[in-house]
Amino acid sequence: MNSRIVVIGAGMAGTRLARQLAPAHDVTLLGEEPHAPYNRVLLADVLAGRYGPEVIALPPVPQGAAEVRRGVRAVRIDRDARTVHCADGSTAEYDRLVLATGSNPVLPPLRGLDGGLPDGVHPFRTLDDCLALAAVARPGSRAVVVGGGLLGVSAARALAERGTDVVLAHQGPTLMDRHLDPEAGGLVRRHLEGLGVEVHTECHARGLRHRDGTVTGVELADGFVLDADHVVLACGVRPRTGLAADAGLTVRQGVVVDDTLTTSDPHIHAVGDCAEHDGTVYGLATPALEQADVLAAVLTAATVPGRGTDAPRYTGTRSLTRLTLGSAGAFDVAAFGEPSPRPGDDVVRLADATRGAYRKVVVRGDRLVGGVLLGDLASVGALARAWEGDDPLPDAPLLHLLTTDGGL
């Protein structure tokens, strides 16, 4: 008899898992959004108008191989009865349950948000968010993006491509400061400014101005007001753990899982943005997909006598963060590992301000531990492989790491 596996969340991780498990298992995939599952990484391309929503659709679960319920929100897990209860009154019984609930956008503590989002204020997390913003962001309108991390920079670039007048307000000292060093962040800033984006760093947003329920501006801590027809909140994401916490599972920053992606309940697993493994919540696509692959193997092995101990284990992901800020890869950004050196580390840096190109790697002993690359990313593949494999570097001058082929 096939195992009944219910997957809550039809994002990239949940859909990939369902495709691998069906039809060998009785799979039910519950997706809260009404759309077909899509690649969230490409939302900025939809906002920019480069792709239509249909282009970013994920490969579907084969028809008839699994039950896919769209627009269905899971609201409660009955662990004793092994049943998921949904907002529409339906239920789904499981032998194994997988939480792939993703994350929610962080709404900053701004005055003016107490009663909900005023008209013209948009988070930037889902396809509906993206389509709503694209429908109103016209040439000549003025948008303020709050948050200069990966998501905010992507949104600002996309809005600028639509002809919108864009202001980017970031409270950190440099853009994308979680991923980039100050010099690289400065290059990203200059790139955006070259597209007409007005960038403010070390700038703390205090509240929203609105009239008759419609946003008119963003008030800064110093009292200055950035006029706005639209405001995009790109202040990070937070794992969606409410279902797990209400069900009594162990939750810290995310839903805590072991090396088999199993929670504190042996019948419940978690993958993707909602999962916390070894103290880390990744919040990136590559780890989510790797976790889905491992869990698919774990659940498959669990149904084969004598195979359970042979199943792979998830030991963490070493992946780079990559962002395309120009058409045809004209200005790409990649960051991995620890871009800030410790005492005793070796640092190799090449910069070409005229071309807007920058490469930096950090070497500790005979290991590559981090790097940042902007502009021409011809060497990123070789560098990423050296870092992901954690292999000793070849006995060659460190400058070779930044040659076209990475010197590897």
Image (spheres, rainbow, N blue to C red):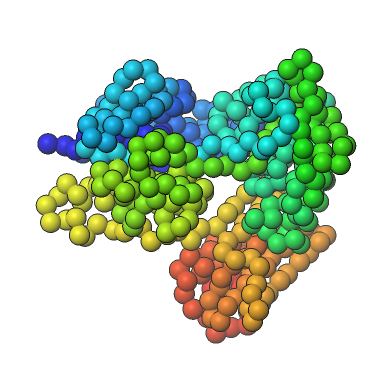
Question: Between 190 and 317, which is closer to the camera in this rendering?
Answer: 317
For the C terminus, the image quarter is bottom right
Residue 191 x, y percent position in the rendering: 78, 49
Position in image of residue 237 (x %, y %): 57, 42
What number of labels is visible? 0
Asked where in the image residue 342 lies, by quadrant, the reply is bottom right
- At x 16% / y 37%, what residue is drawn? 2
Q: Does residue 210 appear to the left or right of 388 in the view shown?
A: right
Query: Viewer-proximal residue, 305 or 331?
Result: 305
In the picture, measured across the screen, residue 62 lies left or right of residue 127, that is left
Tell me if I can see residue 308 in this picture.
yes
Q: For this rendering, which residue is in front, 144 or 274?
A: 274
**Is 368 positioned to the left or the right of 6 in the image?**
right
On the question of residue 375 being in view, the answer is: no
Quarter of the picture holding the N terminus:
top left
Return the x and y of residue 40 as percentages of the image width and height.
53, 38
State the residue at coordinates (51%, 48%): 283
Name the residue rendered at 68%, 37% in the picture: 109
**For residue 30, above or below residue 98:** above
Residue sitting at the far bottom: 395
